[in-house]
Image: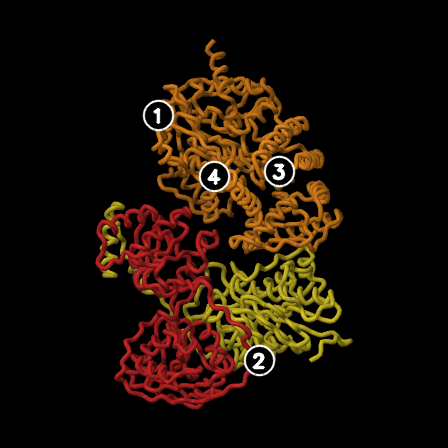
Amino acid sequence: MKDNFRDTYRQYLKDESRTEGYADSISFPKSETEVSEDLKNYCGRGIPVTVQGARTGLTGGCVPFGGHILNTSGLDRFLGMELDDDGSFLIRVQPAVPLSRLRTLLTEKSLPAEGWSQESLAVYEQFRTAPEQFFPPDPTESSAFLGGIAACNASGSRSYLYGPMRPYVRALRLALTDGDILSLRRGECFADGRKLSVRTESGRTIEAELPSYHMPSCKNASGYYAADNMDAVDLIVGSDGTLGVLTELTLKLVPKPKVIWGVSVFFKDEPMAIRFTEALRPQVRNAAAIEYFDGNALGILRNQKANNAAFSSLPVIPDGAGCCIYTELHCGSEEEASGTLYRIGEVLTGCGGSEDETWVARDEKDRNLLIFFRHAVPESANMLIDVRRQSDPSITKLGSDMSVPDGKLSEIVRMYRETTAEAGLETATWGHIGSNHLHVNILPADQEDYKKGKALFARWAETVTSLGGAVSAEHGVGKIKRGFLETMYGKEGLREMAAVKAAFDPSLMLARGNLFPEELLDETGKGARA
Amino acid sequence: MSMTRTAEKKMFNMVVCVKQVPAGAQAKLDPVTKTLIRSAGSSILNPYDAFAVEAALQIRDRLAAAAETSEAPAAPQAAEAPAPAQTAEAPGISCSVTALSMGVPSVEKMLKDLIARGVDEGILLTDRAFAGADTIATSRSLSLGVRQIEYRRGSVSLIICGHMAVDGDTAQIGPELAETLKLPHVSNVLKIVEVDPENSFAVVECIAAEGKQTLRVQLPALITVSKDINVLRLPSISGIRRAEHQDVRVLGAAELNADPAILGKRGSATQVVRTFTPDFEAKAERVTGTPKEVAVKIRDIIGRLIG
Amino acid sequence: MNYIQKNSEIWVYAEQHAGIIHPVAFELLGTARKLADDRGLRVTAAVLGDLRASCGEDLLAAGADRVFLVTHETLKLPMELPYEEILYRLVSREQPDILLFGATPFGRSLAPRLAARLGTGLTADCTSLSIDPESGLLKQVRPAFGGSLMAEIVCPVMRPQMATVRPGIFPRPVPDRTRGGSIERIWQPVDEQRVTVLRTEARRSGRSIAGAKRLVIAGRGIGLKKNLALVEELAGLLDADWGCTRPLVENGWCDSFRQVGQTGCSVSPELLVSVGVSGAVQHTAGITGAKQVIAVNKDPSAQIFASANYAVEGDCVQFMKNLISELRANPPMRTIWGSSEEYNG
């Protein structure tokens, strides 16, 4: 890579995982046609292409290691609206629309409708007078592009109730590496058992034998979705950009709940909080999220509030609080919300907690305070790492992203605690406890800790897999978690996935390094050609 | 005054004056009466009053904690942890926080929310007769409310107001109310250093011309608090239960024995003659061209303006 | 108590600290003088403190016909209760028609107390004052709802008609030492113990942009913290100070003294360049005093344009870069190539 390329385009060589790569060229196509041309131009000539969105990913999926960068930020238009069969509003967008922008426009009920068709405009009129709509998938980093969110099937705290990105993708357009376009609509193309056959716009048929593994029964963003008779759309969502470049997404909107309340409950210790979670789940039907913050996370927050002006408006955490569970209620009325609130009170009292040690956010100002609190947790941990990085630049935060099925929560938490204590590692834990999906963050003091942490993660991947869980619950696999993917599905599973990739991208030049080690890709290539 | 505790409980009653204001830029002026159209639509607690409420609750917590550990007077502000609302009654001191507001009937909901956050009682002064009041008429009406509280509770030791309301932004109510009640006042308080119910004084830190001042003020007194000095605590589940069963006291002009001549528009010394949109709205001259052309044009404009 | 008879006097309360008259007193006297000359009225200044006679002379030179100089060592530190008592007695005795205060922290605390005691009306933060030729009433104009609306207010019956005006809104008059006038020295001790000062702490950093004559203000539209370097550079080239909107302070990008707006400071520069500011009312409330505003924003419908004299639709970072190179290549006349740190506000 030329030095002045790095100087000018440095920011395009990394993502939020702090991995930095290298490349020879970059393009910013502004239309589907330009995307196709770029793909054909580079992949066709055997030059690797890495696709990028907002570069907020945590797994190095958009980090290039040689070749050409295809940055999609030029495709940021809203294209139209339709109505789904069940009457829901569908919105058609290009991939580079940030989630935050979609949210703002939905709240304002004002979309940029220039150039829309008559049909779209008619639906838009209905949308303007209908009750407020919202888009449920809520990855914490709201500056992420919708395309990236679809590529890694991202989730957020509300996925506990609403699910991840996948079900909300109702149609898509995928630019393939040979310049062709694949247009898919949910409900129109299904696999026959594990045999999938799709038709591109130019008439070419792509046939793929879907991997034979079984998806875990918990939150999962690890590798290709594979199930008997599955919808073709579901394969593309969560494929980490390895099958093609998304140029259009049709997304489903949902009416916004009339009443949204947030409830934070403080407990003296972790076992109490886990008991509460397991007791709460069956009792409360309208919880959109159940989140956890452990004692160390609260400790970091207390510290920040005391020492950092930017955090002075954090609410004061009760003195004796050992950990915190946050529940978000999505209700149709205040009566419903009150009723649920009191039931939560009963459950928590039953688990040994106190109704006094709770925070209830019923208006926007208080909800924003709780959002600030929840975002401050990972932010504070990052700041702590940044300080440590000053003495050792190679140190970075290590956060696990594994989930297990219901019933295995206590077991996995016990394992996390025992193994990190044994290794003498400092941690802070938070996450989507409702989905048995916690981010255990190792805060390394030095390289030694970092290595120990990575080793632990590998062990955890095995345990989680043996419990029927997922090694990447929401961050995707990208490059960093390739090893875990192998642990989860085995070499055979990886080979099966690589074969699917080769069917969509015979050049094997797109998103090299994502999901599969490059050697496996090349092996597959040889196998296909043989 | 001696420091020994007597058999009868010492009282320390506080009043926080709170106002409901329109959220964001949604306030409207009635074109005919030239008064604010106050609707329940999207209304919030005046942000400055939120700081006032929290300040009062923190004082109550500290006094209760001090009484529990048998220290008198209350120790200076140390840890910020608010004690649960129920321990307001502790041996030796009876402390209360009453939220007082003058507004439309729907303000009752806002007062109930404050009860859920730990305030002991909410009082709403509402009556058509109060409408259209300027700051003088408003402070007189509020003073009648304070007298009511004083009558019912026996005494009021401290009144806390937010520095200003974000819709009126005159910052006049606090000082005018203090004068009407003939109480000393301190504006722009940043920190309440000490409250001594036994010896009836408080020590506060406030903004002054030179920087900061620390003042000792005899109680009863009124203080207005500055922005961002604390974070209003959220309601708890137990607080919400309590608020559900507790009524807000709603008082009209009759219940206050108020002379109608001093209320509302009638009792106001000032009136709004007209409103108009500021001059410069139409005047923005668009500067267009390529980015380089714009830079040249702006440089010329700046040259003309400062040269 | 109150009185309704008309009198022919405009009074200005001259605030002082440590014996130095606050600039706003001179600004008010300048305006009072103009109003008085139009109508044939007299201007009186009242100053309280532990004072030298020369400050009375400064007040005469600024436009007062008469000065009440109330002095005693117990009045050295401005305090609401004793000052209110003295002013109440003076005003009750002399019965002025109009009484003006600077809207300083102390003025905003003292004036309402006095108004309540006199039972009269007070209008805060006026941006313009005039006397209606027909009714003779003082027309008090102030921004409402953060500046999106202006209200004209009168106090038809009660006297004096009271108003406060923020520093920097009215121009400072050129002192005219040839003016005559009388100074009445009043020796007035005060015994007021209810509020006492235990300690005063001088402002440590002393930094304020409130008095800046030229300002560049940055909003969230600058995108990244590092673009503040461009803001500083531009400000330097314009011999200006720089400020920001609240979100930048909350993000920890800027110190809070730079915050301009309802919960920050008010500014009234001759020239204000606003980059990447959306123009929410909470911010524009702080710039109503700006004389000329150049606003840059990517969004053509940004509210800031309603407060601007010149509107540029475009990316503010690009704008700054282009303007900086243009200013370096072709400096406008009298641009001083100094650093903005030297500016003391």
Q: Secondary structure at mark 4?
A: loop
Q: Is residue A522 above or below residue A328?
A: above
Please tell me the colour of chain C.
Answer: red
- Whole-angstrom CA distance, mark 4 to mark 1, is 25 Å
Is C4 rendered above or below residue A217?
below
Residue flagged by tag 3: what amino acid is it?
Val
Pick whichever, A337 or A364, lies toward us: A364
Q: Which chain is orange?
A: A
Q: Are marks 4 and 3 on the same chain?
A: yes
List x then y, in percent, for residue C171: 31, 72
Tag in front: 4 or 1 = 4
Please give the residue where the numbered disc 1 appears in the rendered image. A37
Q: Which mark is residue A440?
A: 3
Give the Cα distance between marks 3 and 2. Answer: 57 Å
Which mark is nearer the camera, 1 or 2? 2
Chain under callout 2: C
| Mark 4 or 3, nearer chain start | 4
Kindly indicate which chain is depicted in yellow in the rendered structure: B
At x 47%, y 58%, the residue is: B24
